[in-house]
Image (tube, helix red, strand yellow):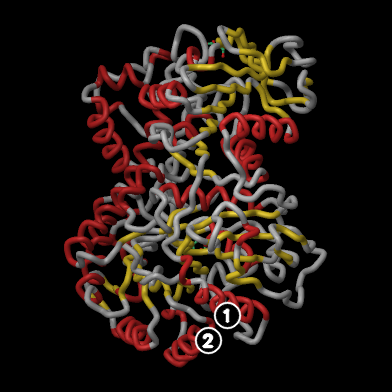
Amino acid sequence: MNFLSNRLGFGADYNPEQWSPEVWRDDIRLMREAGVTIVTLGIFSWATVEQEPGRYDFGWLDEVMDLLAAAGIDVSLATGTASPPSWLSRLHPETLPVNHDGVRLSPGSRQHYCPSSPVYREAAVGLAVQMAKRYGTHPALKLWHVGNEYGCHIQECYCDVSADDFRAWLRDRYGDLDGLNAAWSTTFWSQRVTDWADVLPPRTAPTLRNPAQDLDFRRFSSDALLACYRAERAVLQELTPGVPITTNIMGMWEPVADYASWAADFDIVALDIYPEPKDPTAHIDAAFFHDQMRSLGGGRPYMMMETATSAISYRPPNRPKRTGLNRLWSHQAVARGADAVMYFQWRASAGGAEKFHSAVVSHGGADNRIFREAAALGAELSSLSDVAGGRVPADVAIVHDYANWWALELDARPGELKIPERVRAHYAPLWHANVTVDVVPPEADLSAYKLVVVPNLYLCTDAAADGLRRYVEGGGHLLMSFFSGIADECDRIRLGGYPGAFRELLGLRVEEFWPLSDGERAGLSSGGGADLWADHIVPEGAEVLAAYTGGPLPGLPAVTRHAFGAGTATYLGTRPDEHSMRDLVADTLRLAGVAPVVAGLPAGVEAVRRGRHLFLLNHNDHAVHAAGTDLAPRDVAVLRLDRDPASGAAAAPSLQSGAVPPVGEGA
Ligand code: GLA
Ligand code: GLA
């Protein structure tokens, strides 16, 4: 379904309840000037729309919807349920969330609700029903935006209502207490439970908690948030069939919820992403999240629902984006599969917690570079309508899993491994090699990929282990890092020699883990060095690509490769330094026959193919010449691949901007 009508959407969160009707008229005028095609409306309007339980005031929203329709601007209409009104917290304090220390949080911010609360869910669904009845046939309505960033602040609630809900979830998963006791390994530390009433959320306890309980609580909490979304989605589907439904999820390094299990409930995936303007490598992380969103939708176009035009208010110092950076990062989203570019928010708020967050219209109005850059981008995107709907081909997949993320970062692991660093360490070399990557769950169908990269898959289901094995057997190439295949989905060790799930596939066993101390390094016989971790590998058929030349295991294998079936499995028993990792990835890409999108690009230039277009993105602060094209600092070129889709050289320029007067140069 492409409700964006075969064009690239451009717009912002629109919060007109903060402004007077005269300002709305000015907003519409400026939206047209900026080329806005879509706004996401009313996200925090619950307290304005329903000032007392069941008494609704839609007058102002009717007027705004009509103004937008008259201006030809599409509306992604929020159900408005992200921040409950004060009366709900007063009349039903039990809807307020409780943290793991047992402290009930107060209203006064946002997202102050227990995801399991039937009272909250009923009130939220009640509002969604009213919104659907009122606006279901309004010509401006193109998309439902349910809630907002589920789990952004409250991912879990530890109250008694949640405890009951958790028990019901566990009964469903394990059937009876014997099943639960086995799954949670409760014979350890006398944790056996004999009555469901004794089963609790992992509240603050004397020392290390039961890891399987922690893990299941994360799974349950993700499902509880999903149930909130689904409850609203169900009534919207019933009352307004045909109107697509989504909620915005977050591209950031926090395992907020298991988005892979949410994806089937999105009619279009919507991403909120705030790359840090001060971070010189922010665009690499951003590329990963864009790839993840495209992959969550099975390759279909997604929306970049929120990003910042310039400064982000909650990360002081709030540095603005330098000239061209908003344009560059917006095009990066489009290149990787987004069919819409939208901002938080349209007009900077005069009051409230986020008044210093940049917007399209600033406190000083529209006579400034932020607005001019945004309007120029709006015009550019409208000239690129033939990009909309295009697919982004990828020969490589990287495996990313939320249960593994939760499990890997629990307490008392042999070494301190963090998924953000681990995924980055594998993704960045692929980005530098200009290879496009899909981000897939471990149980995905891998048959379409030439190479599958598996960073540290500690927790692994039997289905995932089988799938990876069959993939390699059938001729696939695998690159896997240490501490993979160690535990099952209940965080129980796969016995009989590490790495239980992959020993045969990798052709080795690991006798012991030797995590390295901070600053400790081990040399590699292939050149370069490694740190963080050293597996004591005993080959059982694998060939040794590199051995340690120092550290705790000198002379022993560090990197191996195993021919298995018709494919190969390359294994990293350590963390190679950046340079060595790039070499290893390059070697594996060659082995798998993966070619870059464009070969021989200057460093810092990203090339992505989308449909019949080639995007060239210069992330450098200097000019470059790439694929026959001159690119100014932070410049973008979009080339139409008329003849040879594999080569930028044969392409005709579709868009390339000249330089704009720089602001923030040298920053
Ligand atoms: C203490 C406890 C043991 C065990 C060890 C190792 O000695 O008595 O039960 O927990 O620490 O952590
Ligand atoms: C999130 C929220 C927005 C806003 C922005 C900026 O993305 O969805 O409401 O708070 O962050 O901080």
Which residue is at 35% across, 88% downward?
A: 70
Q: Amino acid at mark 1?
A: Ala
Residue 167 shows in the view: yes
Q: Is residue 368 above or below residue 355?
A: below
Q: Quadrant of the N terminus?
A: bottom left
- The image shows residue 438 at horizontal and vertical percentages of 49, 44
Looking at the rendered structure, the secondary structure element under dot 1 is: helix
In front here: 595 or 111? 595
- The image shows residue 663 at horizontal and vertical percentages of 76, 73
Left or right placement of residue 468 versus residue 374 in this view? left
Q: Quadrant of the C terminus?
A: bottom right
Q: Which residue is mark 1?
A: 375
Which residue is at 73% across, 35% downward?
A: 578
Task: Mark 1 and mark 2 in contact? Answer it, CB < 8 Å.
Answer: yes
Which residue is at 39% across, 51% downward?
A: 297
Q: Which residue is mark 2?
A: 33
Toward the left, the furthest residue is 238
In front here: 412 or 342? 342
Q: Earlier in the sequence, mark 1 or mark 2?
A: 2
Residue 6 position by quadrant: bottom left
In front here: 61 or 525? 525
